[in-house]
Image (cartoon, rainbow, N blue to C red):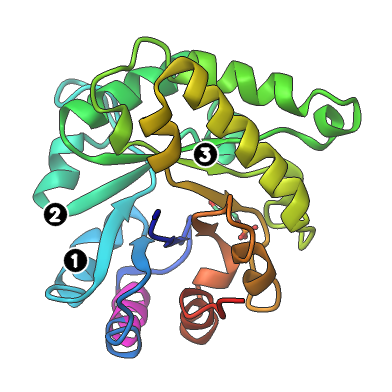
Amino acid sequence: MRKHLITGNWKMYKTPKQAKELAQQLKTDLADVKDVDIAICPPFTALPVVAEAIKGSNIELGAQNMHYETKGAFTGEISPEFLLELGCKYVILGHSERRQYFNETDELINKKLMTALKMNISPIFCIGEKLSERESGKTFDIIKSQLNNGLAGIKEGIDKIIIAYEPIWAIGTGKTATPKQAAEVHEYIRDWLKKNCSLKVAEEKRILYGGSVKPDNIDELMAEKELDGALVGGASLEALSFIRLVKFQKV
Ligand code: 13P
C-alpha cells in the first residue's frame, strides 16, 4: 500500500515571519494526522524558521530547488549540504516554473536528481505537458521523453524519487485535470517504470498530482487509486485550506 503524501509548494510566497506563523499553525492543527505523510516546501530564506517551528511534528521539510554541486563558486545557488543541515527530507526538482523561467533542461534536472540521491534527499521530480502539447495529442510523448532524459542513468536510489505529474495548463489556472485525465498519465508513468526499472519500483512509486488542487476537488482526485498524493501551490498558502487538503475525505 502506498501512503499518500500531501506537499505544499509555497513558491515565492511567505517572508520568514509569515512562514513561521503558518508552520506553527499547521503543526498544531495537523498533529492528529497519521495516515497521510505531510511536507511543506517554503522558500530558502524561511527554511531555518520553519524547520524550528515543525520540530518534533509529523510535518517534513522540503526545499524548492538546489544546485547539482555541493560547493563551489556558484553565486546565488544553494547546495544540497545546506538543505541537509536544515533537516530537509525532500527537494522539488524540475518544476515547470524552473524549466520555463530559468531554462532548466532535462539534462540539468538529471544531474540534480543524481546529486540529491547521492546526498540522501528525496527528490520530488516534476514532469508535465503544456496545453498545446495536450491538444496536439503529444502528452504521452512528452512524459516519456521527460522520464527518459530526467531519469537517464539512474538505477541506484530510484526508489527514493517521488514523481509529481503537473500538467502545465493546470498550474495556477484553476483548471484541474479531471481525476481520469490525471490517472491516465499516472498509469503511463507507472508502466514506464515497470518497463525501465522493475515491477517493484513501479508498484511502490508514489506519483503525486499537481495543478489547481483545492479543498473542493481533493476528495475526488484522491479517490483515484493511481494518485498517491498531491503537490499543491496556491491552496497550501493558507492554513485552513491546506489542513482540509491533508484531511481529505476517503471515498
Ligand atoms: P497550484 O496548486 O497553484 O496550481 O500550483 C501547483 C504547483 O505548481 C505545485 O508545485
10 Å crowding of disc 3: few (<14), some (14-19), many (20+) = many
Q: Mark 2 — residue?
A: 86
**Classed neighbour count for the residue bearing mark 2: other residues with Cα under 10 Å, few (<14), some (14–19), many (≥20):** some
The magenta segment is 17-26
Q: Secondary structure at mark 3?
A: loop
Q: Is residue 105 visible?
A: no
At 14% from the left and 55% from the top, the residue drawn is 87
Q: Are marks 1 and 2 in contact (CB under 8 Å)?
A: yes
Disc 2 residue: CB within 8 Å of ligand 1: no
The picture places residue 50, in percent across and down from the top left corner, at 24, 69
Query: Quick one: 101 or 106, which is closer to the camera?
Result: 106
Query: Disc 1 marks which residue?
Result: 51
Residue at x 38%, y 42% (from the top left corner): 204
Quadrant housing residue 161: top left
Inter-mark Cα distance, 2 to 3 = 22 Å
Q: Earlier in the sequence, mark 3 or mark 1?
A: 1
Q: Which residue is mark 3?
A: 95
The quadrant of the rendering that contains the C terminus is bottom right
In magenta segment, residue 145: no
